[in-house]
Image: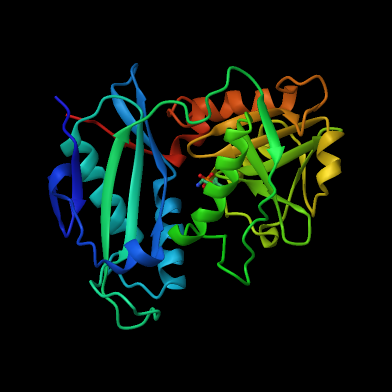
Amino acid sequence: MSQSLAYFRGQIVPIEQANVNVMTHALHYGTAVFEGIRGNWSESEGKMFVFRMREHYVRLLQGCKMLMMDIGKTADELCAITENLINECGYKQDLYIRPLAYKSEELVANLKLQDLSSDFTLIMVPFGAYLDSDGALNCCTSSWRRVDDTIIPPRVKISGHYVNSILAKTEATLAGFDEAIMLTPDGFVSEGSGENLFMVNDGTLIIPPVSDNNLTGITRDSAVTIAKDELGMDVLERRIRRSELYFADEVFLTGTAAHIQAVGRLDNRDISDGKSGKYTSQINEIYQKAIRGENPKYRGWCTEISVA
Ligand code: PMP
């Protein structure tokens, strides 16, 4: 039997008891850092495979450093807390795992990071597909520019800067698109609202540099590894112009929640034939096996948990 539990203030409690006070700093100012991790249930092995968990916690701790938050835990300790909560919850289905480090001080009208208490909490929910599309995504270029590193560093998952992604995603979906692609303040392609972006031309994978205000994506790193090692592709990191995307052979998005999803249309123009391209499909096929522990070569990316 499964139950909805949280790790909260150092203990495992029923989710209804994991509540913060309205004075909490993070609630007012977005002074928090989060992660999105997937636990992938393997029916055949009867185990949970958590994908690249340690890398997610290393990124979380980088975000904590940015926000001067000492949560008093190492990446390995955070992994152990997560494994324990997965066991206690007992879900035997795909999960979205959400760690959150936040400024827990119950104090408003304070715009400093120093001298404020911090805490760490963790929840997990059953989770299926994130981007609801039966094929390639229909995207638009957002009128909202991606938050710049000189404003709030987007390379880590700081809660406050997600207002930027949320404005973009809201605008896109209300206009009937699946997802938004954001540009940097100087007009280069940055990323999706919750995904990194790839372009394929003549068998070369082209990605914007992290300095173009995108997150240091773990799925991006996995897709690059698969493209190089399995498909022998060249990978080029360089700035990308918006108009290049219209004429690309393939464009796709990557993210923990989104997995690897082709972009079939952008700004009402088909990209190639509007369907998932061959490289996108091949990378996705290998990735889908890797995240469920089905590819021995990439089994090291997964933490296996035998849920009781
Ligand atoms: N960019 C943004 C803005 C995101 O929120 C995410 C999701 N974490 C990504 C990219 C993809 O990152 P990852 O592959 O590490 O999930």
Give the position of the C terminus as an image quadrant. top left
How many numbered marks appear? 0
Relative to 62, residue 83 above or below: above
Question: Residue 33 at x, y = what percent?
Answer: 40, 60
* 34 relative position to 222: left or right: left
Question: Residue 272 at x, y = what percent?
Answer: 83, 24
* Residue 255 makes an appearance in the image: yes
Question: Residue 6 at x, y = what percent?
Answer: 20, 46
Which residue is depicted at the point 34% across and 42% down?
Answer: 97
The answer to which of 270 and 80 lies nearer the viewer is 270
Give the position of the N terminus as an image quadrant. top left
Question: Residue 83 at x, y = what percent?
Answer: 25, 44
* Residue 14 makes an appearance in the image: no
The answer to which of 152 and 142 lies nearer the viewer is 142
* 124 relative position to 240: left or right: left
Which residue is depicted at the point 70% across and 22% down?
Answer: 276
Relative to 33, residue 229 above or below: above
Choose top left, top right, bottom left or bottom right for residue 109.
bottom left
Choose top left, top right, bottom left or bottom right for residue 50.
top left
Choose top left, top right, bottom left or bottom right for residue 84.
top left
Which residue is depicted at the point 44% across and 44% down?
Answer: 52
